Image (cartoon, rainbow, N blue to C red):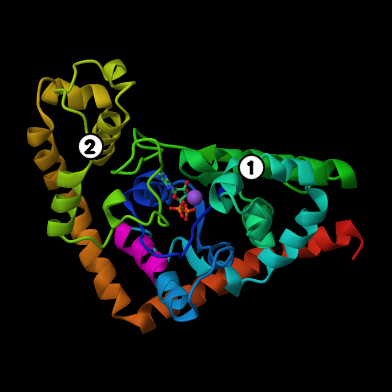
Amino acid sequence: MSRIFSGVQPSGNLHLGNYLGAIRNFVGLQEDYECIYCAVDMHAITVWQEPEQLRNNIREVAAAYLASGVDPKRSIIFSQSSVSAHAELAWIFNCVARIGWMNRMTQFKEKAGKNRENASLGLYAYPSLMAADILTYKATHVPVGEDQKQHLELTRDIAQKFNNDYGTETFPLVEPLIFGEATRVMSLRDGSKKMSKSDPSDYSRITLMDSRDDIAKKLKKARTDADPLPEDPADLKDRPEADNLVGIYAALANVSKADVLKEYAGSQFSTFKPALTDLAVEQFGPIGEEMKRLMDDKAQVDAILKDGAERAAAIAAPIIREVKETVGF
Ligand code: ADP
Ligand code: NA
């Protein structure tokens, strides 16, 4: 059976991009796959996290999965640090991956910024831990946003080099699953930057816990141009902010950008933004409410995480045993 693995960092501010690029797609996959969904807390600490906040943010990620429709009986929900196999395999992969491969990773360059010498070693090795997350379970498919494509290619390179070096067929070559019209949601303030948890401007993103007022305010302030919406999606090519909003609308409504433009061609943003607000509120309202309820019920969420960790560890154990034996440990 094919197995799914995916994760979201518990670094707070879960946003529309995380939802459309990843979390929303987790739900349907439960029908056809064995699914393992993780709060990747070891990735989160590659940049500084306040311990109390981190603990809460782990619950927030679990709550987002649950509120979006992941069923904890069918699928596994857990935190990365609670299954030690991730760290063990990551070290082995650190010894398989080449420094030159890491040097090509664009996310490291973006996140480390200008002061690269001062970034954590963990931030640099992040893709190797990500490969371990997936391959600890021999997962075959990974639902992610487009920003993770490069890391998944590296995961395949690591799997292939491990298999070649040791003359085995230990690891499968994973496939990304990238769905819908908003696989790369951009910042509401700057159409050249992706929407992210770490953007200093709260107005750059819509979060899952935003109220109706928050969503309305942020979309009202969202940067656009002065032209009406075109008929042809191709005409959005040089209008990144407009393209982003139409893409978000299309993804939320489960239609194509062309369909959205059939309805709104000729409209001004003063018409389109309120329609988008209604759509976002309709979808995020109930999710945010349920997340708040779950965040107030720590015992329930913690019990789900504990059960998930036990089930994940049971899948990982024989795989790690096999890998260690292969390596000569
Ligand atoms: P962030 O980059 O916001 O810190 P994560 O690294 O935790 O988010 O990514 C969690 C998931 O959300 C990944 O599958 C990632 O591809 C997806 N994702 C993150 N940002 C976006 C975005 N702006 N648009 C679409 N998907 C995104
Ligand atoms: Na990311």
- Spatial CA distance of label 2 from label 1 is 31 Å
Q: Nearer the viewer, residue 175 or 115?
A: 115
Q: Nearer the viewer, residue 102 or 232?
A: 102
Could you say where residue 16 lies in the image, as x and y percent from the top left? 32, 49
Which numbered disc covers residue 249? 2
Q: Mark 1 falls on what kind of element?
A: loop
Majority SS type along the magenta span: helix
Asked if the stretch drawn in magenta spans residue 147, the answer is no
- Amino acid type, residue under disc 1 in the picture: Met
Please indicate, yes or no, whether residue 169 appears anywhere in the rendered image.
Answer: no
User: Which residue is painted at 58% across and 49% down in the image?
Assistant: 114
- Residues in magenta? 60-68
User: Which residue is painted at 34% across and 21% down in the image?
Assistant: 237
Could you say where residue 92 lies in the image, as x and y percent from the top left? 79, 58
Which numbered disc covers residue 105? 1
Residue 240 sits in which quadrant?
A: top left
Q: Mark 2 falls on what kind of element?
A: helix
Q: Nearer the viewer, residue 210 or 78?
A: 210
Q: Residue furthest left?
A: 271
Above or below residue 290? Residue 128 is: above
